[in-house]
Amino acid sequence: MADKKFIDFYKKNLEETKRKIKASVTDDLLIVQIINNIDDLNKIINILAKDLREWYSYYNPEFSKEIQDHARFVELILSGKDKKIKQSMGAELSKEDLKPIFNLAKKIKDVFEFRDEQEICLEKMMKKVMPNATAVAGSVIGARLLQHAGSLKRLIMLPSSTVQLLGAEKALFRHIKSGSKCPKYGVLHEHPLIMKANRKDHGKIARALADKISIAARVDYFKGKFIGDELIKGLEERFG
Amino acid sequence: MADKKFIDFYKKNLEETKRKIKASVTDDLLIVQIINNIDDLNKIINILAKDLREWYSYYNPEFSKEIQDHARFVELILSGKDKKIKQSMGAELSKEDLKPIFNLAKKIKDVFEFRDEQEICLEKMMKKVMPNATAVAGSVIGARLLQHAGSLKRLIMLPSSTVQLLGAEKALFRHIKSGSKCPKYGVLHEHPLIMKANRKDHGKIARALADKISIAARVDYFKGKFIGDELIKGLEERFG
């Protein structure tokens, strides 16, 4: 009798625990996973592009120096437009020797395309989970803020001055320890408003941006109505 | 008049340099590139598989622990055989949430296949450039020896005791500096003869193997006739 009671209790307890674990997986955690994956894909593109450049330069060393952008480099090799440079000092490789190089270029193009696909998935999820913050920060920057904070709940509990510096932890601690310049922004540095502004306005814009993102993220967390367009419009009028 | 002479000299010199650079690209350098690429692809598979496991475990945490092998893990997810575990404590994800996870699994399978393709290319080149060493060591181990030595010419100039320890540099220097155990082999540890032998015979087999590989590589460098089958047969009779 006591045994049965105990087993019942154990089962209920297990069920309850499973239910809680299930419920703990929220959409913002999936966003963190997808942005982690995008970061890794960018790393992978760099690894493979380095391999390709080193290998390819046996064949046509001048070409690799001329084209710095990885995506364009791969594209030109695949389209056969890499042969324009005459009198290359590269070796003459047989078709068979070139095959694995060409295949590698194809694979890099694949990874580029896959990264773009994952970014589209990310954008969809961001618009669903954080429509306001996405409108202000953009989906990639918004996701990166989430990645650094850990979850949406933790992001909205941060003061906006912390949001401004998320992703600049290293520079911040260097500033505190050794008195070097204080960073003005972390992951926000890729935001179009900052990118196109004068250097001297960067700090001001980053501060305003972090303010609005904090407000937007809080509205998102409490499922308020959509005010993202107003927020970004206000910023664009001030700094755009 | 003197100018023309000078320009002629300059042109001839340039041509000669280009010719020499062209000639310096030998097949063994291409093999080193391809094995470098294979190493990077293995690294990439690990990065992506780690991403996949972490992400997927929100959905079905028990499954990732049960299947340790990356290739099988990916295969089971793609074939839909991952749903067998009942009462998983994972979250219920929508189809849309699962899409990027599934796409990642597909991409990992792609990279696996690409690595296998590159290994086939490697084998072809190894059989062409180092038929004897390939017969004794196998194409991947042979290529790795080449990678560590730098070129075929440098490989054949190494004593066989160095060949035996190529790839074990770290353990060797630790042995010299701090008196820890001397390593018995480096990249040779994956050779089937060593893999299936008793632990106590490992050193003996590695020494014999390195001897034969050194002989085989020298025959390859000087374009001698094919004796690889005799060499490996002798080893198999002694240790197989």
Image (cartoon, coloured by chain):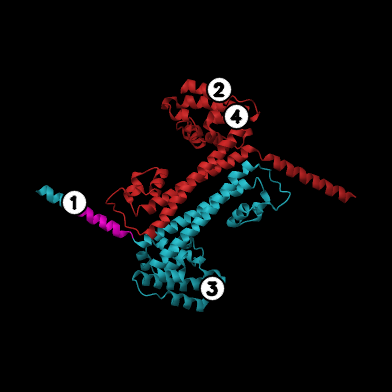
Chain colours: A cyan, B red
- B49 shown above or below A25: above
Q: Residues within 10 Å of mark 3 (few under 14, many from 20)?
A: few
Distance of mark 3 from mark 1, alpha carbons? 61 Å
Amino acid tagged 1: Tyr
Q: Nearer the viewer, residue B62 or A203?
A: B62
Q: Pinpoint residue B100: horizontal percent, then vertical percent.
A: 42, 57
Ranked by sequence position, the earlier of labels 3 and 1 is 1
Q: Pinpoint residue B211: horizontal percent, then vertical percent.
A: 55, 25
Q: Nearer the viewer, residue B100 or A239?
A: B100
| Residue at the image point whose x is 48% and y is 20% from the top | B238
Q: Are marks 3 and 4 on the same chain?
A: no
Amino acid tagged 4: Ala
**Residue A233 belongs to magenta span:** no
Distance of mark 1 from mark 4, alpha carbons? 67 Å
Q: Which residue is mark 3?
A: A201
The stretch of residues the image draws in magenta is A11-25
For marks 2 and 3, give the one nearer the viewer: 2
- A106 shown above or below B137: below
